[in-house]
Amino acid sequence: MTSGGDDGGSGASLKHESYKITGDPRCPEDAPSSSVRMTCSRSNFRAAGWKEEDFTKPIVTIAAPYSNSMPCNNQFRDLADILAEEVERLGGKAHLALTPVISDGQSQGTKAMRYSLVSREVIADAIEVMHEGYHADAIISLGGCDKSVPAAVMPLARQDMIGLSLFGGPALPGEHPKGECGKRALDPGKVMEAIGAYGRGLIDMEELHTIECASLPGSGTCSAMFTACTMASAVEAMGMSLPGTASHPAMTRGDPRSVPDQKRADCAATARALFALLANRTSARKIITRESLENAVTVVYAVGGSTNAVLHLLAIAREAGIPQEQFSIEDFHKIGQRVPLIANVSPHGPFHMSDIDRLGGIPVVMRELLDAGLLHGGCLTVTGRTVAENLANTPRVGDLGEQQVLFRTSAPLAPAGNHILVLRGNLAPESAVCKLSGKLDIELTGPARCFNDEDDAFKAIVGGQIQKGDVIVIRYEGPKGAPGMPEMLGPGAALVGAGLGKHVALVTDGRFSGASHGIMVGHVTPEAAAGGPIALVRDGDMITVRPGARVLTVALTEAELEERRGQGTRPPA
């Protein structure tokens, strides 16, 4: 029996923590975790099918947030089995841990969306319970739909586990059967925008149904640079997944359901990397550092990623024990002022994650950033090598020939400082997050149109009640107010679909989908339910959104705000 690790040692030599549950023959019989004391534990393992030789193998958790009802994670039972086969072939004993998972795409516009962000914690906790509760030695965690990608990394950081993550992969973009969408391929964002277009009479029911049926062609996450692909790119950039795996599709045109050969190869490579990590005792906190998180943020800005990355990377930093003084929301803004937008992908461009993959994946993006002095090349990764070592033979963007997907940092799609910005002002005393996705010279001052519920705002947009120049305020949608901080993709996409995306700002204490684009300001804090100024705004108040100056204000004096606060605010019934 061999471990399959780089040390060429036996499985027993890699077994450490799991002796506590299978019994340690090296301990005296009356000692905790001795073979005698763990007799009952082994009896239960035998009942589950374990053989005598399995008790000398390292236990490897295969964590899989799985549901057969959603495309992002519906392959995860198969992926878990493939990973388990690879682990056992290399001398380990696979321990499957399936967790719940919520689909953002399916819960959009429903109260079920309140469970979406919360599910990140549930998944992370479930993985920790299943790993620590079995004294496993190492872990491979699968990430798919939005919250499951950070959730797959958070427990590794929290408990400093030995392990790595593998992204299930994006779907391919949809193809309109009549070619009516021009060169821009279909993705879930187009479905949401089509709803707004239908509501304003810009498309008919037949076209809406066509887009519904064609936009998501098979298994995999959203095909665009929405939250799942953003976070997969970030996890690869921070060194917690193997280079190149973030962009490998979960499907092929010929077989939209089965696990492709490339993803099977990713499973084998991930298992080999795990055994090398185990042999070298390389745990998560040796990889997840302030510098590696800065690398992750840099890549998020370069690819035009989701604002949800702010929430998730801050959560991973906290789990890794990195103090807020070293890594905070302000660091996102500072990094963003240096990093240009170089990926021309949806939602701000016509291309998709599979197009980045065709050019070499996220490593090509990282090589471009490294050569520009924007990455920390000395950060350790799960390959056992540094970022710079991993990228040594990766082509530069300039080496790719003629293409319009990736741009050089010296001639970017948009200059630095024009993607995710952190705003402040009397409407957001602590902070708010604005997503520009490369749009330049954005500034809007307009009358507030206030809604205490996402559904009411959506009805007003599709009902033609919103005019150019308005500023929509959707409040009581934060962590406490909703509760759960749901995404406001429905109203935002309805604005774009109605042709108002460039002319109406949306300000909310909720959050946005990675598919959101337009003039979007979310994460307003303090939130309305916590007594934030956003609760005091009334219809007609003039709101200014000035991203270039990092300003979000309402034209009210402090005295006027205090007067309204004294009158009380009424949350929605």
Image (cartoon, rainbow, N blue to C red):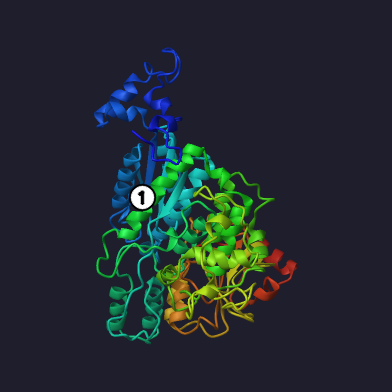
295 sits to left or right of 168: right
The answer, for residue 475, to whether it is visible in the render is: no
Q: Residue at x 24, y 28 (%)?
A: 47
Nearer to me, 555 or 9: 9
Whether 469 is drawn above or below 13: the answer is below
Number of marks in the rendered image? 1
337 sits to left or right of 239: right
Nearer to me, 443 or 376: 376
Q: Tell me where residue 524 appears, x and y as whole percent.
A: 60, 64
Whether 433 is drawn above or below 381: the answer is below
**Residue tagged by mark 1?**
268
The answer, for residue 468, to whether it is visible in the render is: yes
Could you say whether the residue bearing mark 1 is in a helix, strand or loop?
helix
Q: On the rendered image, what quadrant is the N terminus found in?
A: top left
Q: Tell me where residue 306 appears, x and y as whole percent.
A: 51, 66
Q: Tell me where residue 423 appears, x and y as whole percent.
A: 66, 67
532 sits to left or right of 139: right
Q: At label 1, which amino acid type do we have? A: Ala
Quarter of the figure with residue 14: top left
63 sits to left or right of 563: left
